[in-house]
């Protein structure tokens, strides 16, 4: 994996999303490892959230419901189609669907396509921790834009 870092950044190339099954995650409470799931927290040294990039094969469902203790989750579906359910309410998902789930929401999702994988990104952050600074948090740097400090690929 190509990784770059400096005092104020870390960058990784995960590779093509179509080859995401090269990443395997072993949940401590599950008997089998999950292919196609990579958490970015450790890779990037995140300090504010956990983010995972995921690929779910055709005709596959998550095998369990789960909730969270303190984190809300945001699911961004970037490719494919399927169904999501929260507290027994089922609805379709597709490219462009974004879902926020409160910690207590009992959630599950599945890929309903016969042929295509479902790609999605999940962001976890502590519910209630966002203090509303978005535009106000940005600070313009008084410097002309230049692209000469190019890193090798
Ligand atoms: Zn979760």
Image (cartoon, rainbow, N blue to C red):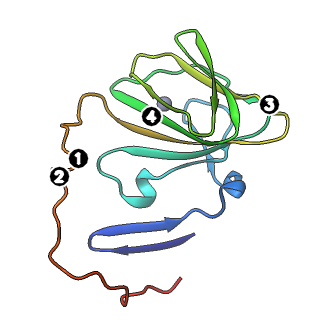
Picture layout, residue 57 above or below residue 4: above
Q: How many marks?
A: 4
**In the rendering, at what x and y percent does residue 110 appear?**
69, 27
Residue that mark 1 sits on: 134
* Left or right for 63, reference 107: right
10 Å crowding of disc 4: few (<14), some (14-19), many (20+): some
User: Residue 76's mark?
Assistant: none
Q: How far apart are marks 3 and 2 (CA)?
A: 43 Å
Q: Mark 2 points at which residue?
A: 137
* Relative vertical location of residue 20 with respect to residue 75 in this rendering, above or below: below
* Residue positioned most to the top: 88
Q: Mark 3 points at which residue?
A: 59
User: Mark 1 and 2 residues: CB-CB less than 8 Å, in contact?
Assistant: yes
Dot 1 or dot 4, earlier in sequence: 4
Question: 100 or 139, which is in the foreground?
Answer: 139
Residue 74 image label = 4
Q: Do the residues labelled 1 and 4 touch (CB within 8 Å)?
A: no
Q: Position of residue 76 (x, y in %)?
A: 52, 39
Cα distance between the residues tagged 3 and 4: 23 Å
- Identify the secondary structure beneath mark 1: loop
Marks 1/4: CA–CA distance: 17 Å
Which residue is painted at 58% across and 62% down in the image? 14
């Amino acid at each position: 994996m190509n990784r770059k870092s400096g005092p104020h950044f870390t960058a990784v190339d995960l590779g093509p999303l179509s080859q995401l099954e090269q990443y395997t995650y072993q949940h401590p409470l599950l008997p089998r490892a999950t292919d196609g799931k990579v958490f970015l927290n450790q890779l990037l040294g995140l300090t504010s959230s956990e983010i995972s990039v995921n690929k779910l094969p055709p005709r596959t469902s998550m095998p369990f419901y789960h909730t969270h203790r303190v984190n809300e989750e945001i699911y961004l579906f970037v490719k494919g189609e399927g169904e999501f359910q929260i507290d027994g309410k089922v609805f379709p998902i597709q490219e462009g669907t974004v879902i926020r789930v409160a910690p207590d929401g009992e959630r599950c999702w599945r890929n309903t396509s016969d042929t295509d994988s479902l790609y999605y990104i999940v962001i976890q952050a502590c519910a209630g921790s966002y203090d509303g600074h978005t535009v106000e948090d940005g600070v313009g740097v008084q410097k002309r834009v230049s692209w000469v400090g190019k890193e090798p690929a």
